[in-house]
Image: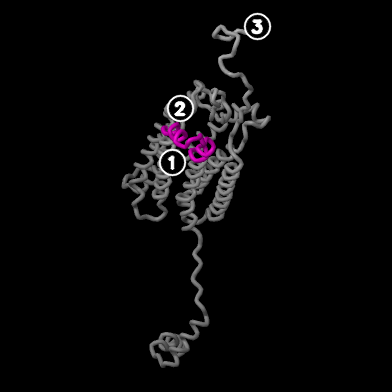
Amino acid sequence: EFIYADGSASAPFPLRLVDVEVIYLSRGLRIGTFCLAMIGVVVCFFVAVMVWVYREKEEIRISQPKFLFTIIFTCVLRLVEVLLVLVDPRSPFVKDIADEMCLVKVYIVYLSIIVRYTALMIKLRMLNIALSSSREPIFSLSLLGPLVLIPALSTAALTASIVMAPPHSAEAVVSRDVYGFPTVTFEYCRLTGSNERNLFQHTPILQVFVVCHVCILIALVRMSWYAKNEKIAFNEARGIYLSICVDAAFLAFFVLFGLLYPGVTTAAGAPRVELNYFLSYIVPVFAVGMSNIIFIVLPKLHSSTPIIPEVVSIESSFISDISNITKNSVPFVEQTFGTAGGEEND
């Protein structure tokens, strides 16, 4: 005879088998995510080819093709982040390596952010030295600060977070039935060692990430603020400043959404985890990556492409000349034929 915890032979609640539905992304959001990623890949490929074609132009050489290729590379890494979202963790092959996939996603996010910020800091530092009246060489020891310190601190923070709480695949309960059984779960990469979701207030690594992110953005804004208003040719500071503003706006949205996430889902009546995930992660990643192309790389390509001269209609010019001659316009005749006549007389 089976005895329950209350000492009786009857179940304290009805026993029944519950079919749990595991969701990830709907078909519509998958198609939207794939379209965003493919648009970004095509744009990055086209821009990279244009930079290579015009690499000998003065505008591209002064802006340094390696710097532009680095910015394009970070945008491609951002798009890889978006494409990895399409990998369904419910598939049999991926389910066996779900934890490793989470680790790969974390490292790609780290690499895209740290390479971009390091390149921007070095570029702004070189630009500020060039604009200042000091005789400090551009390739000086002062560049080793952002070049070494930022990757070192970021690598240390990432390693510490992975050692203390390795990312792993987990399921979050989206909804329950009247008896408390989970009916719908959502698979995601958990960054905490506990059973808490990756909410901002429950995830220390997200808090450290946001604090470091804000410090770096403040440093970049301060460095670009001085140079962005200088009216000189080939000034990348304004584009970098606009790109940083886009990054800061989406970071603020990410933090605000993380703090208000439970309230948003409750106010909606039913949790919309898929849409929330799409708006809070996929769209910001795509927008921040493409802002680098729009504000930093494309202006250089626009200034380096040759300008096609305006074609003047032959008929209109001929008719104008005939009308001037028939009106006995002496200044026009002298301007047109005077020089040639003078040369013949000489």
- Tell whether 111 sits left or right of 257: right
Look at the image and say whether residue 61 sits in the magenta stretch.
Answer: no
In what element is the residue under mark 3? loop
Packing grade of label 1 (10 A; few <14, some 14-19, many >=20) is some
Q: Residues within 10 Å of mark 3 (few under 14, many from 20)?
A: few
**Quadrant of the rendering where the N terminus is positioned:** top right
Residue 285: percent from left, percent from top: 50, 41
Q: Residue at x 48, y 41 (%)?
A: 284
Q: Is residue 336 left or right of residue 170?
A: left
> What residue does disc 1 label?
250
Q: Is residue 159 above or below residue 274?
A: above
Residue that carries the numbered disc 3 in the rendered image: 1
In this figure, which residue is indicated by the disc labeled 2? Answer: 205
Q: Position of residue 162 (x, y in %)?
A: 51, 24
Is tag 3's residue or tag 1's residue first in the polypeptide sequence?
Answer: 3
* Front of the two marks 3 and 1: 3
Range of magenta residues: 259-280
Amino acid residing under circle 3: Glu
The answer to whether residue 146 is seen in the rendering is no
**Magenta segment includes 279:** yes
> Is residue 197 rendered to the left or right of residue 90?
left
Q: In 3D space, how far apart are the residues under numbered discs 3 and 2 (Cα atoms)?
A: 49 Å
> Which numbered disc, 3 or 2, marks the residue that appears first in the sequence?
3
Spot occupied by residue 151 in the image (x, y as percentages of width and height): 46, 32
